Image (spheres, helix red, strand yellow):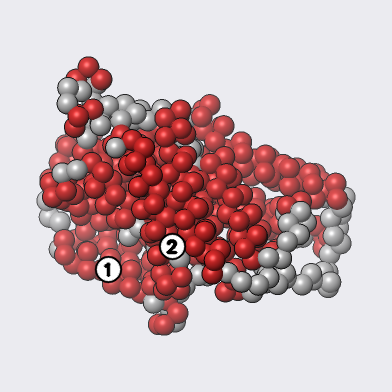
């Protein structure tokens, strides 16, 4: 059954990759893959997997007395456990998409796009990537990728050129998120878990992250020629355009709401989607009051209710299917076996981290980092008596390099990171196209940044 679950995952992965060849939307393939993997896991395991034995005993102790402590109920409990994390990601994604669409409906991004006057592909690529890199550190790579795709739609008309820029946005967003404690979920995990401190993350990882972006950016700069063609403005809008005051107010409130999310998380320790929902609710109230004097037709496209119709639900469902499938692999023990194999066969912390980074391009980096955190404990400084154990102290080299690799390695494939999945859904980028045009650039940047880190700290 283990191999059957893995086989279904690989087959589903192939269907996603060949979306345009088989004419089946990747969201449908992802949903089928995720649900079938879980069904096979539940039907195929007649006893608790060894790595879940402790969780089962705790579950049985709490529920056996009420008659709900059987194996089927435990598997349902594990599914709901994964749905907690998946739902928080999906609600975060939906909230961010709604805020971005609301800003876009008010033409708020003109504050930025009007200042980008260049039509040179190379200059625009540098501007977009640098903005993405630093926005990702301030917000997070998922939110930033959504914002930047909206900007690209205002700046570039040609689809293939926009895809190329969007692919670089994925690389820049992941590189920017790796050196910030709130920029990437895996870095946040290591930060909250106590493996890394804020100053260590920033000072030790910012240079490798910059190199990770500069290498593919430099290579692509030599290949790009000519100028971009801007989208033609729609002169047939059937609703009155917003005033400059309304446009600037909604832009400031929306961006302020996105920036508020990591602050809310730091202060309250609640999941990020709670801060996103609070920001969305406040922006919703603001826009309702802002347009309450307008008639229904005028404000139809300027309120959250109108904007919600434009949200790409297929992208959200694609996300759901992918994360369900990865969760099934984790429950079946495939990810733990992979982590153990890395530890035994490689036996070198740098090679282990590099492998985890590349593996995170195939499966989600969150369970891989979680498995790594479970494999190795934080070694007290007093107990670090040799070079090996010294790498696992708080702020140790293993944890630093893990944050870089897990944060940037997912750029190698478009479904290897939250930012990539979001961009793929929003721009409908083909998996194979990304593999041909962007993956090699991402891998070169990944290894270049890793090399810089090794030269600095190894």
Quarter of the image for the C terminus: give it.
Answer: top left
Q: Is residue 75 visible?
A: no
Please state which of the two labelled residues, at mark 1 or mark 2, is closer to the viewer.
2
- Residue at image coords 83%, 69%: 238
**In the image: residue 20, left or right of residue 41:** right
Residue 374 in the image: x percent, y percent? 24, 37
**In the image: residue 457, left or right of residue 103:** left
Q: Crowding near pointer 1: few (<14 within 10 Å), some, many (20+)?
A: few
Mark linked to residue 85: none
- Residue at image coords 68%, 70%: 227
> Is 104 rendered above or below residue 450?
below
- Residue at image coords 73%, 56%: 116
Q: Earlier in the sequence, mark 1 or mark 2?
A: 1
Q: Secondary structure at mark 1?
A: helix
> Is 26 rendered above or below residue 455?
below
Quarter of the image for the N terminus: give it.
Answer: bottom left
From the image, tell me which residue sits under label 2: 441
From the image, tell me which residue sits under label 1: 10
**In the image: residue 369, left or right of residue 385:** right
Q: Secondary structure at mark 2?
A: helix
Residue 72 in the image: x percent, y percent? 21, 51
Real-space Cα distance between discs 1 and 2?
24 Å
Along the line of sight, the residue nearer the viewer: 218 or 265: 218
């Amino acid at each position: 059954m283990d191999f059957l679950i893995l086989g279904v995952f690989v087959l589903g992965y192939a269907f996603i990759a060949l979306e345009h060849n088989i004419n089946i939307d990747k969201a449908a393939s992802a949903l089928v893959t995720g649900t079938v993997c879980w069904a096979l896991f539940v039907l195929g395991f007649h006893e608790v997997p060894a790595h879940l034995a402790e969780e089962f005993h705790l579950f049985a102790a709490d529920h056996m007395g009420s008659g709900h402590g059987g194996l089927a109920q435990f598997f349902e409990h594990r599914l709901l456990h994964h749905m907690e994390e998946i739902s928080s990601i999906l609600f975060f994604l939906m909230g961010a998409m709604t805020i971005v669409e609301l800003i876009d409906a008010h033409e708020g991004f003109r504050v930025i796009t009007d200042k980008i006057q260049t039509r040179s592909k190379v200059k625009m690529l540098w501007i977009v990537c640098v903005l993405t890199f630093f926005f990702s550190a301030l917000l997070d790579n998922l939110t930033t990728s959504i914002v930047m795709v909206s900007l690209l739609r205002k700046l570039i008309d040609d689809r293939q050129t926009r895809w190329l820029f969007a692919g670089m946005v994925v690389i820049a967003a992941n590189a920017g998120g790796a050196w910030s404690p709130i920029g990437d979920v895996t870095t946040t995990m290591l930060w909250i878990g106590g493996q890394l401190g804020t100053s260590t993350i920033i000072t030790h990882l910012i240079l490798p992250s910059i190199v990770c972006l500069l290498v593919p950016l430099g290579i692509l700069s030599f290949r790009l020629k000519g100028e971009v063609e801007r989208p033609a403005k729609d002169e047939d809008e059937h609703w009155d355009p917003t005033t400059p005051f309304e446009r600037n107010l909604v832009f400031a409130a929306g961006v302020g709401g996105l920036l508020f999310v990591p602050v809310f998380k730091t202060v309250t320790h609640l999941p990020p989607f709670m801060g996103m929902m609070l920001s969305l609710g406040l922006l919703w109230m603001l826009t309702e009051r802002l347009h309450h004097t307008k008639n229904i037709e005028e404000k139809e496209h300027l309120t959250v209710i109108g904007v919600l119709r434009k949200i790409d639900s297929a992208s959200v469902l694609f996300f759901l299917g992918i994360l369900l499938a990865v969760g099934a692999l984790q429950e079946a023990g495939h990810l733990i076996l992979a982590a153990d194999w890395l530890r035994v066969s490689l036996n070198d912390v740098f090679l282990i981290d590099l492998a985890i980074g590349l593996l995170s391009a195939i499966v989600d980096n969150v369970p891989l980092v979680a498995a790594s955190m479970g494999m190795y404990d934080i070694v007290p400084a007093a107990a670090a008596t040799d070079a090996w154990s010294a790498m696992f102290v708080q702020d140790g080299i293993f944890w630093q390099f893990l944050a870089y690799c897990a944060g940037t390695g997912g750029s190698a494939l478009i479904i290897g990171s939250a930012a990539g999945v979001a961009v793929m859904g929003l721009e409908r980028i083909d998996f194979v196209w990304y593999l041909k045009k962007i993956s090699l650039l991402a891998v070169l940047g990944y290894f270049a940044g890793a090399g810089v880190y090794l030269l600095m700290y190894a």
